[in-house]
Amino acid sequence: MHFSLPDFSACRVLVCGDVMLDRYWHGATARISPEAPVPVVQVKNDEVRAGGAGNVALNAASLGAQARVIGLVGEDEAGRLLEQSLTTQGVACAFERLSDAPTITKLRVISRHQQLIRLDFEEYFDARHAPRIGDALAAHLDGVDVLVLSDYAKGTLADVPALIAAARARGIPVVVDPKGTDFSRYRGATIVKPNLSEFEAVVGPCPDEATLIAKGEALRAELDLEALLVTRGEQGLTLLQKGQPAHHQPTRAREVFDVTGAGDTVSAALGCGIAAGLDLREATALANLAAGVVVGKLGTATASIEELYDAMNLHAPLTRGLLTADGAVATCLRARAAGERIAVLLGPLGQPGVALLAQLEKASRAADRLLLIEPPDTDTGSLAVLAALRPVDWVVQADESARVRLLEQLCPDALLHAEVAQ
């Protein structure tokens, strides 16, 4: 899919959910403990990072957005470290501090870039704290472009229906990263983003794509969502949008090193894309690119604008416009090697008009790239106009025999025919 990265600097992203401190102890391992068959790690470095909803906000800030996070923390060192880590990286914090619960902390012991053990320090937040989150949200909704709810089932979002209702009453889109099997709590949100295992825990096993789409559409309609986005690991992402055919995007990961926090990155990029005015398919493509960047890093991480530009160049280093038949084959093979799917629309298409533009928009949704094949008698001016239209990636002129050879070589993922020659 072809889209340009917007300027996120004016986007105001509010994140609300379970915040946590990710702590990493790094050290060398050279021997086994005499007390038990476990490695001895000589800790040399104590690293802290924001996790959970904090990591979502940090990812939004990394893209240049104005990010604020609301959550529950304890009156403890971990809470202070978490706030300090976020504020120094450009995230405004609106934490509700509790005297009767600790800040959620996950301590990981790392040696030679391998995680040896994780220790969790947490207690489920009592539901009586929910009104404090509701009040904090109401105090910070003015001027917000998107609300991202990050649910890790720790109790911060105990009254999530009220939070969704408060945002939607002001016309603010709501992105939800869900948890648990009761998705009715998220009714009325703009888009809910489960991973495949979370999705199947709600709707049952999906042995094939057709089942996933059918069950997903039913769930989307039941919850009155504008869209449902299922992240499927190495199988990519599937977007189910109201009034639109199912849209699949292949994974954009170059090398998977650590998937920790990748879901947070998807939520943040999706929210930033919506706040910047991208449509849901474009916002999903942005989220897919960002996730592909962070899984190549150790631990909870973020994707910067510069890294997204690099990723776009890696996965789509292809110019658009008029191509020869040989050039089209070479270019499409490069696109497919980058994980992109190819749709071919066979002309003649004629002069641009409202009907043709609608047809091109529809055709472009069938895959990541759209190639038009026009007959040899199409005039040069018409070809140039078609090549300049936003839904179109490439245009080729070919007679009948050349078209057959081209299709045999391309094996397009979707083959479409012009509905009306104007």
Image: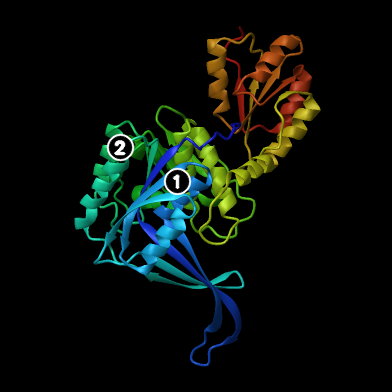
Against 247, residue 352 (above or below) is above
User: Which colour style is shown?
Assistant: rainbow
Q: Inspect this view and state whether residue 338 appears.
A: no
Query: Looking at the picture, how far across and down is residue 123, in whole percent?
Result: 29, 66
Q: Residue at left 52%, top 84%?
A: 38
Query: Could you give the CA–CA distance between mark 2 and mark 1, rounded to whole angstroms?
Result: 17 Å
Lower position in the chain sequence, tag 2 or tag 1: 2
Q: Which residue lies furthest to the top in this view?
A: 422
Q: Quadrant location of the C terminus?
A: top right
The three-letter amino acid code for the residue at tag 2 is Ala
Q: Which residue lies furthest to the left in this view?
A: 128
Query: Looking at the picture, how far across and down is residue 104, in whole percent?
Result: 36, 64
Of tags 2 and 1, the one toward the viewer is 2
348 sits to left or right of 101: right
- Mark 1 highlights which residue? 267
- Mark 2 highlights which residue? 167
Q: What element carries label 2?
A: helix
The three-letter amino acid code for the residue at tag 1 is Ser
